Amino acid sequence: MAKTIASEIKDDILIVDDDLLGLRLLSSILVEHGYEVRNARDGSTALMMAAAAPPGMILLDIQMPGIDGYQVCEDLKSNPATREIPVLFLSAREEISDKIRGFAVGAVDYISKPYHTEDILARVETHLSNSKMHMALVERLNELSALHQISKAIASTRDLPQALEAVCKTITVLFDARLTFIALQANDSTQLKGLIGFERTSGTISLASAGSTVFDSSLLLSLQSETRSSVITSLQSLPFPEPVREYVRENNLLAGLIVPLISRGIILGFLILAKEVSGYIFNRNEIELAETIAADIAARIENDRLTEQARLAAVDAERQRLARELHDSVTQSIYSLMLFSSGWESMARQGTLADPAEAFHRLGVVGQQAMREMRLLLHQLRPTVLEEEGLIKAIQQRLDTVERRANIDPQMVIRGNLEALPHNIEDELFNIAQEALNNSLRHAMADSVIVRILEDQGKVTLSVEDDGIGFDSSTNRTGLGLKSMLERANSIAGELTIHSEAGRGTRITISVEVHKE
């Protein structure tokens, strides 16, 4: 009776045995039950075959001429390409010491000679199943680790291009790709820009800097399938612009995956993976993983665009505020100078100007106030060093460029560890200090001002104190920017206090608990 050979290949098994009869017998049992079998008669051949095309399992005889099974197993486990292949030893010996040594070098089981079909099949199927479960678990853990790295890079890296570069590197490793790059679509245009990527051999790249040109995204849009992503089996056949086609050819990019970056139903760009494997088909799990990553990337890009829109709106609002202040302060002061000088000139010509010295003094006071206002506005127009240098240097620059040049004696007192303050707290403390200094400059008629920033066991206290005319702090005053300072203090859960007396100056203090980054 003819034996029936299973039509579906279950797995690939490499048998290593110098006994030809035993090799044929074991091979026939496995082939009959649906396994693809390769044979090797010695350890050296087995190592080369396993490295060239790793099998799903290796059945390895212990006693062989040349390299014995123990050494072969050790070499397999030392090679990353073959480390995870389950090895079952073949042996007619039943000594416990032999088995202990076999397990020590990395074997997972023994098959005893003479062979018994049921025993062979049970052990092979069990360990193949365990190996697949282990590999699936390792793959899933690697995916989760990569997703964590990507999420961390997206969330924690302020600079968008830098974040996308880190993401491309992680994706390239995760998918074993040759190249990953992200192409962003220009606002209100089909043109692609911001071609940021990572190439496995050369590192971070920019296709634009590599001689590419910005090209229309309609080609990539036309490739999108109903599943939103598109698997490309022949990248070199696509009608890319010539610089891109040349780059694809030079780097032997053959198969690809194109995933749109979509936020609120709008395509912001594309995530593109390329492999050197001709005809490679990305499986459903890989596509879903890439789409998950693409959704995170799209969210970050959209967030950056909204942030930029908010920044531009804030810049416009600040320009309008400065225009109002220019009109309300400097322009009014200059107008007063013109009125005074014109009137007093007329009185002087008529001989009715009683006290010329007092008139000149008043002109000087008004001119000095106009100069102070102008210096303040110029400082506000200049980019702050807060982002680059931190809170202390930003306030020191303010004191040097405004107060000192306005003939106000500025002092600064620092104590404690003020490094690595959270950005939101730094921003609000700086803004409160600016408001307090502005009040002193415009209204206090002070000769000196002291800024103190003290840190003690996680509590930061900032105070601005002047020796100006002061005011009655017991009255309900909403002007002088006090409402704005109070709102800023509340936004960082800080406590704002104001102490002032007529003729005895003003002190504004903000205290906040800090959890440093």
Image: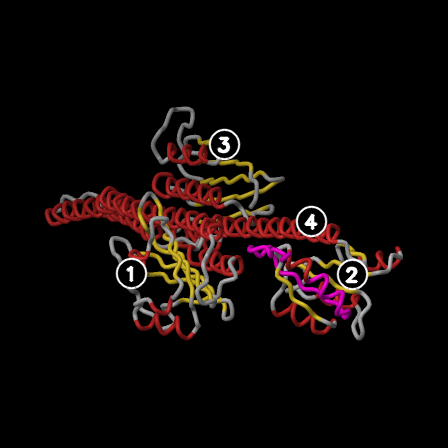
* Labels 4, 1: front one: 4
- Asked if residue 376 lies left or right of residue 276, the reply is left
Which badge, 1 or 2, is on the more N-terminal residue? 2
Which badge, 4 or 1, is on the more N-terminal residue? 4
Tell me residue 476's x, y (percent).
38, 24
Please state the extent of the stretch shown in magenta in the rendering.
Answer: 1-27
Residue 495 marker = 3
User: How are the residues colored?
Assistant: secondary structure
Residue at image mark 4: 126
Cα distance between the residues tagged 1 and 3: 57 Å
SS for callout 3: strand
Mark 1 Cα shell of 10 Å, populated few (<14), some (14-19), many (≥20): few
Which badge, 3 or 4, is on the more N-terminal residue? 4
Q: Amino acid at mark 2?
A: Leu
Mark 4 Cα shell of 10 Å, populated few (<14), some (14-19), many (≥20): few
* Labels 1, 2: front one: 2
